Image (tube, rainbow, N blue to C red):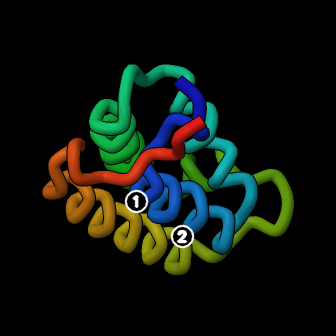
Amino acid sequence: MDTDDLSEETYNTVIIQTERFHHDLTLQFGVLASECKDDNDYLKKSLLMIEDWELDIEAAIFEIFYDNIPEIDKFKSVLREIKKSIKEIQKIPISKRKFEEW
């Protein structure tokens, strides 16, 4: 799938929120979409990716960011916010989420 296939809730929470923080982080979540079958799968894999980064936050920073590397505390904070938001979206049945109609 592509990021265009994400629900509005997921897109706004993950893609827009990460873009506000740092474009390099958005790229990671954008690439992840190509490995997912639907919105729920994307949310699940996003959480797993964040949890993996949190295991070694310093290594993650140097893997993800190329320019203007953020402070570790700010990166940790944005990851916590995204995780919290993802968990809220997961409570919404997929039939109640909004999707772009082409």
Residue lying at 40% horizontally and 59% vertically, measured from the top left? 9
Residue 59 is tagged as none
Q: Earlier in the sequence, mark 2 or mark 1?
A: 1
Viewer-nearest residue: 13 or 71: 13
- Left or right placement of residue 34 versus residue 26 in this view: left
* Mark toward the viewer: 2 or 1: 1
Residue at the spot of label 1: 9
Residue 86 placement (x, y as % from top left): 31, 58
Is 69 above or below relative to 34? Answer: below
Residue 77 placement (x, y as % from top left): 44, 77
Where's the C terminus, which quadrant? top right
Q: Quadrant of residue 69?
A: bottom right
State whether residue 52 appears in this view: no
Residue at the spot of label 2: 75
Q: Residues within 10 Å of mark 2 (few under 14, many from 20)?
A: many
Viewer-nearest residue: 41 or 77: 41
Is 90 above or below relative to 3? Answer: below
Is 13 above or below relative to 32? Answer: below
Residue 67 placement (x, y as % from top left): 85, 60
Residue lying at 57% horizontally and 56% vertically, measured from the top left? 15
Residue 90 placement (x, y as % from top left): 20, 52
State whether residue 2 appears in this view: yes
Q: Quadrant of residue 44?
A: top left
Q: Amino acid at mark 1?
A: Glu
Q: Amino acid at mark 2?
A: Phe
Viewer-nearest residue: 43 or 101: 101
